[in-house]
Structures are given as C-alpha cells and as structure tokens.
Image (spheres, rainbow, N blue to C red):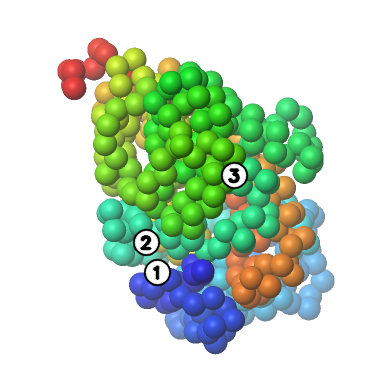
Amino acid sequence: MTVSTPRSTDRNLAVPRPRQAPHDALWPDVVQLPGGSRARSAAAGLLMRRALARLPLSVQWGQASPSGAGPLLRVLEPEAFFRRIGAGGLIGFGESYMAGEWEADDLVGVLTVLASHVDDLVPTALRRLRGAWVRRRPEAQRNTVAGSRDNIRRHYDLSNDLFALFLDPTMSYSSAVFSAFPASGKTFTSAQLRKIDRLLDLTGVGPGTRLLEIGTGWGELALRAAERGARVVTVTLSAEQRHLALSRLREAGVAERVRVDLCDYRQVTGTYDAVVSVEMIEAVGAEYWPAYFSTLRQRLAPRGRIALQAITMPHDRMLATARSHTWISKYIFPGGLIPSMRAIEEESARAGLRIVSDDSYGEHYAETLRLWRERFRRQARQVEGLGFDTVFRRMWELYLAYSEAGFRARYLDVHQLLLTENTTTANGPR
C-alpha cells in the first residue's frame, strides 16, 4: 500500500504508509509553514478578509466573534492561513485545512459558496497576473506511458480496503444515476448499476459483442457486460484494481469471458464493436487527448459505438487550470485535468468521431459524493486502522467535499456521451 503524499519537490511517487514514517516526513508542506515575505502574507490576509466579507458566509477569525451570514468558516490560525495562501494560493488553502488551521461544520456548504463565487475572490486586476504566482505542473506529472502508470498508482493503488470502506458493494468509483433524491445507502447500488446499464445500452452490448473497456476500475462494468454475453477486454494501470477485479470476476463465474490487461490505453490492439470509458479521460491530460481519441477511433470496428462518461468544467476555467499545479493535482490526482465539453467535441471531431447523444446529470454526482463522504466519515476508525493518519483523513474529506461542492455550484458537470465514427470526415477512411 502506498499513500499519495508528495514531498515539497513533488518527485516522490510512493511513500510508506503513515505508521511506517515520521509525521513530518510524510507531510512536509503541511507540518512546516512555507517561507515567503511578510508583505506577501499581509497582502493575502487583506485580500482574503475583503473577499470573504463580500460572500454569503459567516467567518470567524481566530477568537473574534463571527461576522456575516451563511455557512460558518472558522479560521483558527489566521496568520498561518494567510501565510500559506500568500505562498501557495489554493494549494495553501488546502494544506491549511490538512493542518487543522481552519474548520467548517458544514464543509460542503462553505466550499459551495466559494465555488459559486470563484470570480469574486480575486480582483480582476490580480487575475491578469495569475501566471506570476500560480505554480506550473511538475514535469514528472506528464502522462507519458510511464508517467501515467505512476500517476494512476498514486491514487488507485492506495488500498482496495480503503476504497471498500466508502464505495458501494459494486466498487463503482464514478457517478451513479439515481431515480430520486435524496438517496440512501439502500438505493446506492441500484443507482450504480443503472449507470452501468445505461452505458452498456448506449453501445448495444449483448451476446457476442466485442467490448473494450478503457479503465477497469474494480471490474463491475466488465462483469455486467459479461453477464450479457459479451466478450470483454478491459485495461487498467492499477495493479491493486486488477487484482480485485479478477477476483470479483471469478466469484461471479464470468472470468472466462473477460480479459483484464495491465496496460496503457495506447498499447491496446484489435478492433471492437463497443468501447466504453468511464471517467477516465480526466486522467489523460490535455497533451494526450489527441492520442486518446485517436485510440478510440482506431479500436472501433465499422458501425461500432463508443460510450464515454466524463466530468466537465467550463472551457475558460479549463484553460486557466490546464497548466496550473493545484491542490488536487498535488495530493489527489497527479496529472489529471477535467476537460470542457468544447474540448471533447473538438478533440473527438479531429479524430474522426462525432457525438450522437449527450446526457448530463451533475446533480447525481453531487448526491454520489455526499454518500461517499458520509460513509468515509463514519469509517474514520477503520481508515486509521488501515494505517492512514489524521492528515490523510482530513485531505480525503476535503477532496470529497470539494468535489461535491463543485457539482452543487454547477462549476462541474458529468456527461454520458455516445460517439460513432464520422463517415463524412475529411480524414478519410482508416
């Protein structure tokens, strides 16, 4: 088991579990306050106080009484909070939470307000200077074949037992499709199966279908397709996921119909009647989107169908964050980038594909994340028992709440897309 906890250089790709290393060695940028000028820290303090005062939030600075109306944000250590933000922007904001320097009883509520007013946090004049203070993504996070393998392992090879604590029994780590809100644990599995069945229906998967799945997860979609009579090749870069997926396929009695390959999507061969890829494009990186969509087209048999499930963000936001090193890219998904629908449309068209149908349902993802977050919090002792320390648990809670807030603020969305080969493309036949 490894833990995704980059050091200040962001070069380490796997470190020992928390119980095997000193606290400060695991989280150097959390334990130690960053350097930087007092002027920069003071400027960050002035900026944050003014920005938060304009938002529908109640804010408490240190021991002072809260002011404002809305979800309560308690900044327990204002000077440390300002220092981190002055040195690292939003990375510092996240690290400050990991360090316990700010709290919120309604963490999702606070983050939803911030996501809904993201343009109000920094004055327009300062936004033009973004390039002067935003860190660029480390070269080591580029999604080359070797880089992708390392990036994926840092998240998905944490521990199958960890993910099992908060995912539903299907081990689905993507948005469910609910029949009603609010959802409950009793309906969670059926909502995840509904999502999978919609994707398989989109691509017409049935007896004899040759199906390629890019991004195995823990095997539920491949299992479900095999039960329909399909022959499945599914690929993953996570050894932990592959191990559990193979076990689950054997237990379901469909292992002979499914091949689980530990390889990159760019290394797949053959052609298939259907290709399905669920929330995998977010791990590809903009630099490699052309290769991703070209692979989809090249692997598609004549009259075949492609189903994608993809998280999206507004195009201007995607462009602003494409080269930025963010808290998410540092601690949660190294190398990841959420695309915009415009980017998907343009890149798929260049590869000779066309989008036939598009169904978005961001509110379902917010509900999915709520259930994951509540389950994770209830399992705090079990998470600790697996060897993950308090900083890791706070990091994971912030990640789940931050993601849920993005969907509740409609900053993020999720789409199920059906693509086919564009037979009129100027690229000509394969």
Type of amino acid under label 2: Asp
Q: In percent of the image, x 50 and y 48: which residue is there?
A: 246
Q: Earlier in the sequence, mark 1 or mark 2?
A: 1
Contact (Cβ within 8 Å) of mark 1 with mark 3: no
Alpha carbon of mark 2 to alpha carbon of mark 3: how far?
29 Å
Q: In percent of the image, x 46 and y 37: which residue is there?
A: 256
For this view, does 384 lie left or right of residue 29?
right
Q: Nearer the viewer, mark 1 or mark 3?
A: 3
- Circle 3 crowding by C-alpha within 10 Å: few under 14, some 14–19, many from 20: few
Residue 81, compared with residue 156, is above or below; it is below
In the picture of the structure, the residue carrying the numbered disc 1 is 13
* In-front residue for pair 262/258: 258
Contact (Cβ within 8 Å) of mark 1 with mark 2: yes
For residue 150, the mark is 2
In the rendering, at what x and y percent does residue 420 appear?
A: 36, 20
In the rendering, at what x and y percent does residue 176 appear?
A: 63, 36
Type of amino acid under label 3: Glu
For this view, does 227 lie left or right of residue 164?
left
In the picture of the structure, the residue carrying the numbered disc 3 is 251
| Residue 198 seen in this snapshot | yes
In the rendering, at what x and y percent does residue 245 appear?
A: 52, 48
Residue 214, compared with residue 237, is above or below; it is above
- Circle 1 crowding by C-alpha within 10 Å: few under 14, some 14–19, many from 20: many
Q: In percent of the image, x 54 and y 83: which residue is there?
A: 20
Quadrant of res 209? top left
* In-front residue for pair 92/203: 203
Q: Earlier in the sequence, mark 2 or mark 3?
A: 2
| Residue 89 seen in this snapshot | no
Alpha carbon of mark 1 to alpha carbon of mark 2: how far?
6 Å
